[in-house]
Image (cartoon, rainbow, N blue to C red):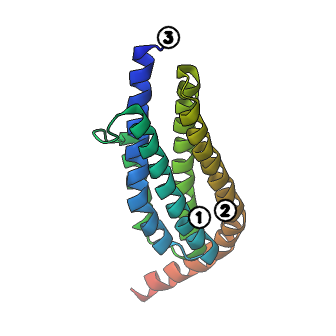
Amino acid sequence: MRNEGLQQLYIDELKDLYSAETQLVKALPKMAKAATSPELKQGFEDHLEQTRGHVERLEEIFDSLDQNPKGKKCAGMEGLVKEGSEMLEQSFTGAVMDAGIISAAQRVEHYEIAAYGTVCEFARILGHSDQESLLQQTLQEEKETDEKLTEIAKQTNQQANEQEPEERALRRGSRRAA
């Protein structure tokens, strides 16, 4: 017998994830546009397509539950997207900007990994094995995206470290001219 309280919590968490994923569909193109590294730009474009697939999986789950995915705003993702937008407004350039974008993106991935891990377990306990399988696919893709970002960050952070003295010299030069 299913626990109705846990079932309702599961649906609520899925709605939160649906909101999170739809917010990301809007945010990822901005991150891709701001990225200077072709590899990072392509990574965001690929993840956008993957995120659209995450939305479709969630819609499939909601259909099987005979529930509407809408009606909840994911405040956590809203905050993470806002932080990412603030990063894009900084005056950083080149690899330093890319390092900041990666930082914001990894926060998002970690949030999603935690959320999908939770709903996977709820689905398992509630006996929703088909839904659990779909959610596990998404969880695995989120983990892979995080790993790709970590790999890109290794090179980007090194480049940012080498770039920083050049930016300071430019800023010093512009202050002297003022």
Q: Which mark is residue 99?
A: 1
- For the point 68% across and 72% down, the residue is 159
Residues packed near mark 1 inside 10 Å, few (<14), some (14 to 19) or many (20 plus): many
Q: How much space separates mark 1 and mark 2, taking CA atoms?
A: 6 Å
Q: Is residue 31 left or right of residue 113?
A: left
Task: Residue 76: name its quadrant.
Answer: top left
On residue 1, the disc is 3
Give the mark nearest the N terminus, 1 or 2: 1
Contact, CB < 8 Å: mark 3 with mark 2?
A: no
Name the residue type under label 3: Met
Extreme residue toward the left, this view: 71
Above/below status of 111 relative to 95 = above
Of pointers 3 and 2, the one earlier in the residue sequence: 3
Please name whichever residue, 84 or 6, is drawn nearer the observer in this view of the structure.
Answer: 6
Compute the Cα span from label 3 to label 2.
47 Å
Rounded to the nearest angstrom, the CA distance separating label 3 from label 1 is 49 Å
Residue occupying image coordinates x 56% and y 49%: 109
Nearest-to-viewer mark from 3 and 2: 3
- Residue type for callout 1: Ala
Q: Is residue 134 visible?
A: yes
- Mark 3 vs mark 1: which is more N-terminal? 3
Instruction: Return the x and y of residue 129 as percentages of the image width and height.
Output: 59, 30
Q: Tell me which residue sits at (72%, 68%) in the image.
A: 155
User: Where does the image place residue 73, in percent across and percent down from the top left?
Assistant: 31, 42
| Residue bearing the label numbered 2 | 153
Horizontal side, residue 160 vs residue 100: left or right: right
Residue at 51% from the left image edge and 85% from the top image edge: 173
Q: Quadrant of residue 84?
A: bottom left
Secondary structure category for the residue under label 3: loop
Task: Give the quadrant of the C terminus.
Answer: bottom left
Secondary structure of the residue carrying numbered label 2: helix
Q: Nearer the viewer, residue 120 or 132?
A: 132
